[in-house]
Image (tube, rainbow, N blue to C red):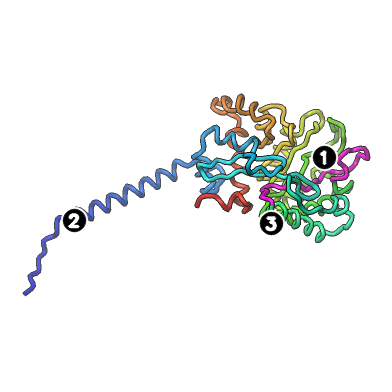
Amino acid sequence: MIFKTNRTNPYRSQLRTAVLGAAVLALGASIALAQAVPVVTGDARVDKLLSQMTLEEKLTLIHGTHEDPAVYQGQAGYLAGIPRLGIPGLRLADGPPGVLTRHPSQGETATMGVAATFSRKDAEDNGLVIGREDRALGIDVSLQPFVNIARDLEFGRAYNTFGEDPYLTSEMGVAEVKGIQSQHVMAQIKHFVAYDSNSGNIFLDDQTLHEVYVAPFEAAIRRADVSSIMCSYNRINGTFACGNQSTLTKILRDEIGYKGFVTSDWGAVHAVSFINRRSTWSDGRVHSLILRFAAPAATAKNRPQGACGGQRRHVRRPYSRGTRACTRWPG
């Protein structure tokens, strides 16, 4: 015989209450955590990583350093990662032409030779080979193409350009960037901007600046979504290119809408204040200067946004670009 009862098991009721309470606490903790992460990039994964970084770790992402000799590839530059957050370093290899490290690689056609084909397809194929070599050699950022304009016959680096025509340079540059980045390597076009002479100071009017010198960079940004740009050694109308707010902020960020990161040419950063002008990554020669002056400034009331916020581009771009670094990021 089975007897039914309406009495509730007190232990079951207590268990139900405990489980419900734990669920409410977990939900509250999740909401609190979500609210505690500031929205910087709009990418929740990247914003979470940024919120977990210390000031020193953020500064690590905006200046170059030396890679461990045991794994150093002989490349031009290295950006240290943050191991505790699963963010690896980035290797930057020089060019053109080809990929320059301590290892043998394909001998590519000289840049001017690529331009002489007047073929977008050939330029893209050339970029594809470069990107493939980069990836095979463990390189994350390919420091090319060189999209400056050859207007001075005595310019020592004119052979690295696509010639004197801004339209041809734009077309070749866009195609080569597409080829490099199709291999999950970040291309870095250089040198922004008006780096066309051995002269240290270039004087030019606004129309010439936009229509001749900026045009190839704008094309690569709008049509190829180039990941990064290198600023140049020269001064523009008296102001250093890597600390020039008019070109790096007004033109590059505000007018063109560039979202990637800017790397200084090696030794082209002359003051920590350059960071505020959107030169957001500097080579290793000024790392002690940044650590000495940028860290105290970043804790002050009017902290430099380059020092505290510029590193977000170095976290976001590899993630969006699908480079070697991204494949090792935590889920």
Mark 3 or 2, which is nearer the eye? 3
Q: Which of pointers 3 and 1 lies earlier in the amino acid sequence?
A: 3
* 152 part of magenta stretch: yes
Mark 1 or 2, which is nearer the eye? 2
- Image mark for residue 209: 1
* 117 part of magenta stretch: no
**C-alpha gap between disc 1 and disc 2:** 76 Å
Q: Determine whether label 1 and label 2 are within 8 Å by CB.
A: no
Mark 1: give few (<14), some (14-19) or many (20+) Cα within 10 Å: some
Q: Which of pointers 3 and 2 lies earlier in the amino acid sequence?
A: 2
Residue 83: x and y in percent read 53, 42
List the residue tagged with mark 3.
Answer: 183
Residue 259: x and y in percent read 66, 45
List the residue tagged with mark 2.
Answer: 13
SS at mark 3 in the image: loop
Q: Quadrant of the N terminus?
A: bottom left
Residue 9: x and y in percent read 14, 59
The magenta region covers 137-160
Q: Which of pointers 1 and 2 lies earlier in the amino acid sequence?
A: 2
Residue 202: x and y in percent read 85, 33
Left or right position of 325 against 270: left
SS at mark 1 in the image: helix
Disc 1 residue type (three-letter)? Leu
**Farthest bottom residue in view:** 1
Magenta: main secondary structure: loop
